[in-house]
Amino acid sequence: MRIIVLGGAGKMGCIAVQALAKDPRVDEVVIADINQDQARIVTDYLENPKVSFRQVDIQDKRGFVKSLEDTDACLNATVYYTNLAVMEACLEAGTHYTDLGGLFHTTRKQLELNKRFTTASLSAVLGMGSAPGIPNIQARYAADRLDKLHSIKIFDGIKPPPPDDVHFTYAVPTIVDELTFEPMVFDNGEFASREPLSGFEDYWFTEPIGLQPMHLSLHSEVATLPISFQNKGLKECFFKINYWGMAKATIEKVRVLADFGFADEEPVEVNGQSIVPREVMVSMLSGNVPPITDFLAPPKNKPPDWVKEIVTEIQGEKDGVEITYRLGTLTCKGALPTGVAPAIAAIWLAEGRIAAGVLPPEIALEPEPFFHELEQHEIITKVSVTSKI
């Protein structure tokens, strides 16, 4: 089994490479990246003969398609702007596809490729990072056990860093988009937009995360779950997170920059040169992302100082009784699920376990086997059920 990880030298991609390299089902993992120096850091750190590197520039379409040939699956771990172009290349090369998410709007466009993937007998799983990905499958677990669905509420809780920490937790362009774009919700059976950083509520997570302020954020779960479960009468769906796992003060500083126009994409003239403010801001902020080795799973006797719990609460009915499922997926000493979850999906794609077409996680993957595989990486899912008679 040969799997290519596009962006495998990046922050989340390197975790997927590590998870794949450790899996006995995988024979070869190819880091496909434009950054040769960073790829060397990853390969040297992993010291695994399964891992190889191929310098790839997706702007070189012919070379990129060639790199995908004779590959069982492509895991796209680059920023979501590339999703559609990479899917087109996979169609041409005859390669299965998965990614980390499309921030709602791109995901909706990707779903339009379903007929072409089905005709080509190829499979694509959209949004298989930690979130989106895990919450979708959590929702599927409950939906399989309920006659009706009323609401799906997703809470992505991350142990906050110290107040003076200015580091970004993942791709700066994506965080800037999530911070400035209007979140989408499914409210009373209709899609609607809300203000960025709105809808605050406090939510209790497993310790040591505890009580956290949660706010709406634009995410791909809301793009697919209402469609997948429309036959069960779903009326409400949203995604909330606590400052994207960053210090509140850091987010507030970025918001100030955005308020002053530094997130704008319209070019401005500066000393006779055309400059895009957003590109300047993203470039400057990208220096605050931790080194690549901080994202790889550390030795077991040195757990990282972060904890993440993804919780989905699903309210519905079974035999006329109101029931609430709460599924919490917790990681505090295993690998980051943003890399592990798509690695599992890529393996299932390579094994032919996923139907042809362009599918969201809640349709593509069976919950129990998926949660079992997460457990192998010390990412544990617990289920609680309450009923109202």
Image: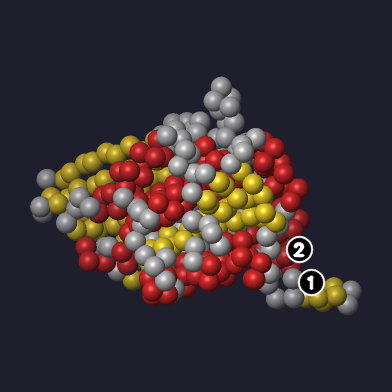
Residues 369 and 336: in front is 369
Residue 261 screen position, x and y as percent: 70, 68
What residue is disc 2 on? 280
Residues 107 and 161: in front is 107
Please tell me how crowded label 1 is: few (under 14), some (14-19), or many (20+) other residues with Cα within 10 Å.
some
Image: 266 above or below 35: below
What residue is disc 1 on? 275
The answer to whether residue 247 of the structure is visible from this angle is: no
**Secondary structure under badge 1?**
strand
Q: Quadrant of the C terminus?
A: top left
Which residue is pictured at 76% across the width and 48% down the height?
A: 37
Give the amino acid type for the residue marked by disc 1 in the picture.
Ile
Which residue is pictured at 62% across the width and 38% down the height?
A: 49
Please tell me how crowded label 2 is: few (under 14), some (14-19), or many (20+) other residues with Cα within 10 Å.
few
Q: Residue furthest right?
A: 271
Instruction: Work out whether mark 2 precedes mark 1 in sequence or the reverse, and give the earlier one.
Output: 1
Which residue is pictured at 14% across the width and 52% down the height?
A: 318
Residue 335 screen position, x and y as percent: 52, 37
The answer to whether residue 88 of the structure is visible from this angle is: yes
Residue 111 placement, left or right of 283: left
Image: 12 above or below 48: below
Which residue is pictured at 38% across the width and 70% down the height?
A: 118
| Quarter-of-image position of residue 380 | top left
